[in-house]
Image (cartoon, helix red, strand yellow):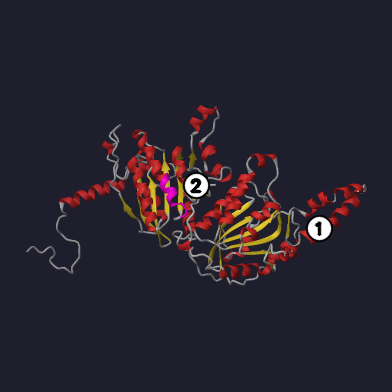
Amino acid sequence: MIELFDNPREDKKSDRPAPKSLVKFRQIYQDAMAGAGEEKNNAQKAKGKFTARERISYLLDQDSFFEIKSLVESNCHDFGVADKHIKGDGVITGFGRINGRPVAIFAQDFPQLGGSLGLAHARKIADIMDKALEAKIPVIGLLDSGGARIQEGVESLNGYGEIFYRNVKASGKIPQISVILGPCAGGAAYSPALTDFIFMVEGISHMFITGPGAVKAATGEEVDFDTLGGSRPHSEKSGVCHFVAKSEQDCFRQVRALLSFLPQNNEEKAPSETTSDIADRPVHVLERVCEMDPKKAFRVHHIIWRLADDYGFFEIHQNFAKNVVTGFIRMGGEVVGVIANNPDCLGGALDSDASDKAARFIRFLNAFNIPILTLVDTGGYLPGVQQEHGGIIRHGAKLLYAYAEASVPKITLVLRKAYGGAYIAMGSKFLRGDFNFAFPSAEIAVMGPRGAVEILYSRDLKKETDAQKQEEMKQKLTQQYSDKFASPYQAACNGSIDEIIEPAEARSKIINALRILKSKRDPKKHTNTGNIPL
């Protein structure tokens, strides 16, 4: 009998030469790790961009990356693609950890055939997405690709179809994050659009369906890459992008921060954190809200910061539809999603973009078991021909649907004003808010008291010809209307709100409400709904 080991308990490097099969494997593996080679990798760095492996290393916890399918090659025999024997086919796939928690990841390698997507490339991405869904862990895509690989014809387009299908299949079940780190053109742009969050980096990220050349040929418009599909237009105008970073390192820091607020899947709750910030910390500065003119602009961020543990707020869609603010905070150590009207922009009025922004965030929170805190300070829906013709009815209905559908804990606080349909839309009691609070100075009515007076008493006001007396009459009638029809006490009497609260006690009241509702929904029994783009 042949003994394989001299000493079964001994395990140290042997002085014997390595077997030929092992030498061959090590050489092939070394070539695969080198990617496109030093020259092409240096060209990537000359553009101010990292290589795919460097990106993975920056994003994941140290030494946590576990790669799979590193030796996959394209089956394309045309145009010399197969002859190049590109190991990995231009995309790196595998698993790692972020903040100690497992994630699945794929990173397109632009120096290899421009990161173009062929069938083998697509199958690698599809496989890692399948495994992420089976393992119930988040999937992160680092995208840097020239698009479909034209050498492979329609098969490359079929590959995109496989990825889109999996994006939809995983929607609402595991968090999906897209990080745009170069071009993302044509059909490739639709996969990120199906994911939950999109990150872009100033100067290097570009997304568009048709590039500048095609735009000029079709419409005659001359436009550069940044103006057409850079981080600024997509974060400020289109709303496609949720986060903008100054650099790749900053981008990876933001991704890690986002994941710290998210559960691994829809069957878990978001991770808790210990905090030294006491739950019943009084917030006396909020008393100033009671003395403010309802029409006066202010940034709602100041209220969010003071309600949050340690004044921390991770804002989402910061540059888009600024009249509504969305993001994550912690209260009593638990993750909470915030939707707040922002009087500093359009007076906090709701428009089409703000409705879409808030509705999709609410649906994400509902899918992943995160409680919703709504801060209301709105004069209604934004009026105007442009809004009506732009579909404010259709877009506003999405917000109503999202709140009514959500079965996670829902807590609403009316700060100063809540008028008209916007009052109902912003997490009202009759869309099944669990706890609805208001400050003593809040106005809750069909419309603003002054506007209501001008309609209800128009004849009486017209009879008064003296301008000063007419204004005095308006003020008197406005106060009477406000006391009778817009008072929070009236809303409390008819059950529109649960309680009028001391502003200084807002933080402790909300945390107590969250603790009461902690077991409202069992995540594993929740009926899954996908997070469709809105």
User: Quarter of the image containing the N terminus?
Assistant: bottom left
Q: Residue 486, how many percent across, how many down?
A: 76, 59
Find the distance from the CA under tag 1 to the CA under tag 2: 49 Å
Looking at the image, do the residues carrying marks 1 and 2 touch, with CB atoms under 8 Å apart? no
Quarter-of-image position of residue 137: bottom left
Q: Residue 406, how many percent across, how many down?
A: 55, 58
Q: Along the line of sight, which residue is nearer the eye, 431 or 164?
A: 431
**Amino acid type, label 2:** Met
Specify the label residue 200 is tagged with.
2
Part of the protein shown in magenta: 164-172
Secondary structure at badge 1 equals helix
**Which residue: 37% across, 44% down?**
109
Q: Along the line of sight, which residue is nearer the eye, 278 or 403?
A: 403
Q: Residue 126, how many percent across, how many down?
A: 37, 47
**Amino acid type, label 1:** Tyr
Q: Report the side of 277 relative to 291 (left or right).
A: left
Q: Report the side of 92 relative to 356 (left or right).
A: left
Mark 1 Cα-neighbour bin, 10 Å: few <14, some 14–19, many ≥20: some
Quarter-of-image position of residue 505: bottom right
The dominant secondary structure in magenta is helix
Q: Residue 362, how many percent across, how many down?
A: 56, 55
Quarter-of-image position of residue 102: bottom left
Specify the label residue 481 is tagged with.
1
